[in-house]
Amino acid sequence: MNVGRHANKVKDSVAAALEGVADGATIAVGGFGLCGNPEALIRGVVECGAKNLHIVSNNAGNMGKGLAQWLKAGIVGRVTCSYVGNNEDLQRMMKSGEVAVTLVPQGTLVERLRAAGAGIAGFYTPTGVGTVVAEGKEVKEFHGKEYLLEEALPVDFALLRARRADSFGNLRFWRTAQNYMPIMATAAETAIAEVEELVPLGGIDPDDVHLPGIFVHRMAVVAEHEDPFEYKTSRKRD
């Protein structure tokens, strides 16, 4: 395979990597809380001017950081997430009706994204049976147990953050900061990664590749990050 033709995956700026993000886009954003957030890409979306976005994420930021920047900028119309938690911005906008929020059980959210990447239209799960999660959904019995039909969740863009990448887009994440990102990439029409370190092709051992470059369309090198703590705790010595 001629890998040279893929060199344009590495863009010279965050703005160039985000080209095509427009009003009404559905965007999956990696991160768990503030861990592993693609901070530069999140800021870049605010700067590109797109509005009425549909966020798909575990949560929509916290403490005014992460995806809470999109909420504060007023560019979000809808959020599909599994956790609201201490995100005061989202709680306020959800109550006021400014932003439509769909809460999805965490495992179901991941499986909906995975199904989209695998070309599966939907799947049955026991999670949510007998709760508000089941409202308006088909319920079917298998072997004496009830299951809900959940639909796949394809997205227009996935925003990722990787610790290391090569020029083809093979990615390696930093420990648990990997979280949802490989699954989101497979569900996306266009996956965009900000990478802390770019290495030559072959610079990542094949066994260390967390996400193959075939799923990554664009990259921007971003070496510096804030990496904020949500709640810093420590143990006192006796």
Image (cartoon, grey):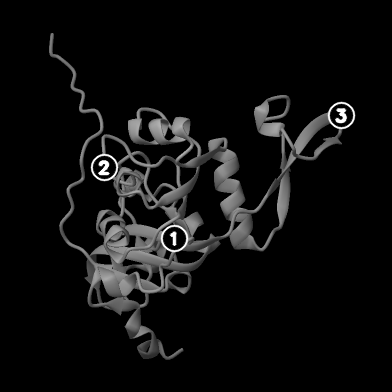
What residue is shown at x 28% (from left), y 77% (from top)? 11
What residue is shown at x 24% (from left), y 28% (from top)? 231
Callout 1 environment at 10 Å: few (<14), some (14 to 19), or many (20+)?
many
Can the viewer see residue 78?
yes
Callout 3 environment at 10 Å: few (<14), some (14 to 19), or many (20+)?
few
Callout 2 environment at 10 Å: few (<14), some (14 to 19), or many (20+)?
many
- Alpha carbon distance from label 2 to label 1: 19 Å
Determine whether the residue tagged by mark 1 lies in a helix, strand or loop: strand
Indicate which disc residue 158 carries. Answer: 1
- Alpha carbon distance from label 3 to label 2: 46 Å
Indicate which disc residue 65 carries. Answer: 2
- Contact, CB < 8 Å: mark 1 with mark 3? no
Question: Which circle's residue, 2 or 1, is located before the other in the chain?
Answer: 2
- Alpha carbon distance from label 1 to label 3: 38 Å
Residue type at tag 3: Gly
Indicate which disc residue 144 carries. Answer: 3
Q: Is residue 207 above or below residue 113?
A: below
Tell me residue 32's x, y (percent): 38, 41
- Contact, CB < 8 Å: mark 2 with mark 1? no
State which quadrant residue 153 falls in: bottom right
Mark nearest the camera among 1 and 3 is 1
Tell me residue 18's x, y (percent): 34, 69
Q: Residue furthest top?
A: 238
Q: Nearer the viewer, residue 177 or 160?
A: 160
Residue type at tag 1: Ala
Can the viewer see residue 203?
no
